[in-house]
Image: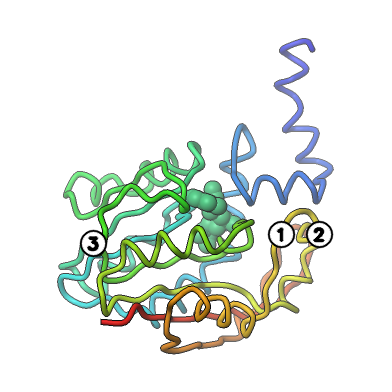
Amino acid sequence: MNINLLKQIPVILRSQPDPRFIAQQLRKPSGDFAKEVGQKMDIVNKPLFDLTLEVLNPNENDRILEIGFGTGKFLEKMFSIEENIDISGIDYSEEMVKLAKQNNPDLLSSDKLDLRKAESDSLPFDDSSFDKVFCNMVIYFWDHPKEHLAEIYRILKPGGAFYTGMREYESMLTFPFVEHGFNLFRVEQWENILVKNGFSLLESRRQQDAPLEIDDMKIQLISCCIAAGKDK
Ligand SMILES: C[S@@+](CC[C@H](N)C(=O)[O-])C[C@H]1O[C@@H](n2cnc3c(N)ncnc32)[C@H](O)[C@@H]1O
């Protein structure tokens, strides 16, 4: 295909968003469309980040890992609650790693933040090295949750906790793209999966997000954060 025609494809898709394409981009943002997808994720997922932050409640000296950080736009909020923490993040999208690095230059140069390209079923960290691990809107893309949860369990310190940020099942159904490769869970189903994979349930908190308008859609979502511990 002519190279100039190839360059035009994202523009064409932008004017006619295809739910299958959006689903692929949310699973792994890539190419020219990645930045735009990232900006939309930030609008929709900010309230969920705030909820997860509230439940996770960073403590002094915590070593924290975010899986699937996307644009990494909200990471600095964690330091506004507790300055003396150390955050690592992984995302398997090259474009998101680049964008998140651009969004956090000061934290990266202060060595309080480390952002890397990696996959959550093969985490590049030692056993028992984190106090807290969290991910927001990522579990939908785990085709075999067991493999990702085993890795999270391995790198958590005994007594550490994993925080899953997700939306209620019915909230997810408001998005037409979830038909295309999203693994959807009810909160109770996800809690059962966590328990089957060795975690103990600590807390599940729900919040009704403020109404949002995005791409001519008016939406109101219910955010959930489930905290699950690794026993001491
Ligand atoms: C829907 S976005 C959510 C981004 C961000 N957490 C938020 O709440 O806006 C999912 C992100 O997780 C990343 N991701 C999905 N599966 C992953 C995996 N197995 N390992 C690492 N990153 C993953 C994607 O690249 C993408 O940046």
Which mark's residue is nearer the viewer, 3 or 2? 3
Q: Position of residue 104 (x, y in %)?
A: 32, 49
Q: Say whether residue 34 is left or right of residue 152.
A: right
Q: Earlier in the sequence, mark 3 or mark 2?
A: 3
Residue for badge 2: 179
- Gap between marks 1 and 3, in whole Å? 30 Å
Looking at the rendered structure, the secondary structure element under dot 3 is: loop
Q: Position of residue 210 (x, y in %)?
A: 61, 80
Residue for badge 3: 129
Q: Which mark is residue 54?
A: none
Chosen colour scheme:
rainbow
Relative to 219, residue 94 above or below = above
Q: Which mark is residue 182?
A: 1
Please name the residue shown 24% across and 52% down the image: 107
Looking at the rendered structure, the secondary structure element under dot 2 is: helix
Can residue 42 be seen here? no
- Gap between marks 2 and 1, in whole Å? 6 Å
Q: Say whether residue 26 is left or right of residue 86.
A: right
Which mark's residue is nearer the viewer, 1 or 3? 3
Tags 2 and 1 touching, CB below 8 Å: yes
> Identity of the amino acid at label 2?
Glu
Q: Quadrant of residue 133?
A: bottom left
